[in-house]
Image (cartoon, helix red, strand yellow):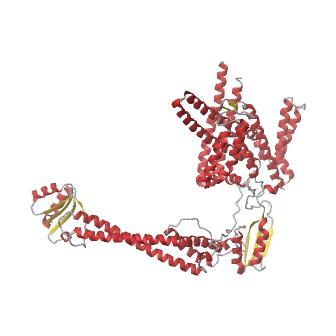
Amino acid sequence: MAETGLIAIGAGLAIGLTAIAAGIAEKEIGAAAIGAMAEKSESFGKGLILTVIPETLVIFGFVMAFLIIGLAE
Amino acid sequence: MIDVLKAERMSKVVVTAPKSFIEPVIGELYRFNAMHIISHVKSELDIGSPLESASRISEILVVVRALISKLSLQDEARLSNGFRALGVKNFAQLAKAVRLLQEDVNSRLEDAKRIGDELKVLDSKVSILSVLCGLPLSLEAYVPYSSISAFVGFVDSPELLRSELSVQTDEFELFSSGAKFVALFVPNSFRDRASGLLSANGFSELSLSLVGGLKGSPSLALDSLRARRSSLLKSQESISRQLVRLSQKWHDFLLLSDAFLSAELEKAESPLRFASSQNIFVVSGWVPDSGVDMLLQRIAMVTKGSVDVVVEAPHHGEDVPVKLSNPAQVKPFEFFMNLYALPRYWEIDPTVFMSFTFPLFFGIILGDVGYGAVTVFLLLFLSRKFPSAAPLAKVVMPAAFSSMFFGMLFGEFFGFEELFGFEIPHVISRVHQIKEMLMVSIAIGLVHVNAGIILGFLNELRHGLRKAVLVKGSWLVMEAGAALLALSVLNVVALPSYFGALLLVAGFVMLLLGEPMEVVEIPGIVSNVLSYSRLMAVGLASVGLAVVVNGFVEDFASSGGLMLIPAILVGIVGHSLNIALGLLGGFLHSLRLHYVEFFTKFFKGGAIPFQPFGKKIEEVF
């Protein structure tokens, strides 16, 4: 029983920490992308793509969380 | 063969002709509207100078545009078929007509301004006189005297002023009206003290200079001013009516002239992009292959054969302007290329692939029959209400239908997997078969990324087979090696494990020989493929939210009675929010899988768009 609790905490950490990391990374890129767009509005497409690149981290976190939860079964 | 997948094929056309033919050639190029002119850079040959008519045209154009803004005409300018639509024969007549109209409009605008100014003065006079009306004095009473000083204005309290004055002297005359207005007359000798008393009472003077010339009783003067005012207002109205009539009458003429003159000016200034010498001029530009013969015929016709035309295929690696050519069903997806970057002339245009995979990914992420149907209606409404959103709606529409299709595969309707106690039939359940969904997502990723590598191989072919095999083929070899290694280690295939390892190393060496810099991207390909797990993850998050909303709705609804109202509210708000999130997520994530994971395997982009000189002439009568 105690083990299930630890597994749940682990899954939570996996997704929560990756989300924070992605947020920090996207913050910087997003600010730069908005700056670029102000100079040149055509850069919207590229800016958008660059901004969403780090969100792969959360996806990985999500997958890991899911695999960790699988340990409880 | 691969050319079908690339942008429209172009030829470079260089036209050399005597200067006497410059106008007809420009006219023909303009009407032809399919030549991307390459601006000449000064070399042995000078840059051409504008046609003589350019300055005359721009003069008229300035007047026309001024008139359009003065008459505040707003409309899309249509293109005319020339002088005929304007009812004139040549530039001189057009200039004359425009100038006459300009005089007409200007004199009216001046009248209107004069009347407006007079009205302003009149209004201040009226406000002064209406104050003076309160006193029993004629206007002559206020003219300056030699021995008496007059103060006219407002004080805090006329009664207090009177009592203070009477303490000091009885040689004064004070008239007051209303709560504050006073006119005080005192001998010049008392002037300074009176002025001191007044300022102690908060005096502010009313300047009478505007009404200085008027005589008689203020109320009579006021009446005559008011009469003048109403007659001015009437003429102001009539002028603005005349202006409205003028703008209605000349609306078409002016807008057509604007369009016509702009076009003529563009033609007249086009020699600035040509090369020219004393007697000849040279135009060079890119023309789609399909139009070359037609252009040659037309130019030969207007120059009566005295022209030299060279047609050549683009040199390898030359910066050729790009005009995407895709079948009508795929055309809307060129939107994504414009959003990102135009493929280069020598590259494969991935629009066709995107038109297939974008709806696929979007559908897997937002796979719900209900959500898909709502999206379809939302898009129909959007494209009707906001025509500017139509291009976007056109690419999302197939994606919305794909959502409905995958909704059926997943057996989901607004997050419900069963309706009225019956389970909706499904092929795979996103909520309960997460592991399977993950496998499917990664398999899709493997296929998609490898498709990108194969396209990259095809792109590299123009640098030779060896290069293509080393740079792109090496990735396939490495993947095969990794797969073989894994399978033999897991004892799925009965091969010694060094077999796979050998293949892996071979691929690595090939890449090192082909493009050493790309070695750093080897770990990247693993994360690229794993990144496709978002197809499962984002979709699952969307289902999760829908299930939560449905849970709330059921809780409220089970209480019955009045609790049905919050149940409905929570349902509508929750699902709207989830649809909005799902649309945004589905759109961005599928787009990103293309731009980041797929395109990086083959796409460079950054071509200049094909911008043909001229316009299609639209006949207007």
Q: In terms of depth relative to the viewer, which is nearer, B612 or B577?
A: B577
Q: Position of residue B546 (x, y in %)?
A: 63, 35
**A34 relative position to B141: left or right:** right
Q: Residue at x 62, y 77 (%)?
A: B84
Q: In terms of depth relative to the viewer, which is nearer, B347 or B334?
A: B334
Q: In terms of depth relative to the viewer, which is nearer, B111 or B462?
A: B111
Q: Position of residue B522 (x, y in %)?
A: 77, 41
Residue B183 visible: yes
Q: Position of residue B59 (x, y in %)?
A: 56, 75
B47 in relation to A1, above or below: below
Q: Residue at x 66, y 26 (%)?
A: A10
Q: Quadrant of the C terminus of chain B?
A: bottom right
User: Quarter of the image holding residue B519?
Assistant: top right
User: Quarter of the image holding residue B131?
Assistant: bottom left
Q: Residue at x 52, y 67 (%)?
A: B73
B362 in relation to B221, above or below: above
Q: Quadrant of the N terminus of chain B?
A: bottom right
Residue B11 visible: no
**Label total for image:** 0
**B139 relative position to B296: left or right:** left
Q: Position of residue B29 (x, y in %)?
A: 71, 72
B134 in relation to B277, above or below: above
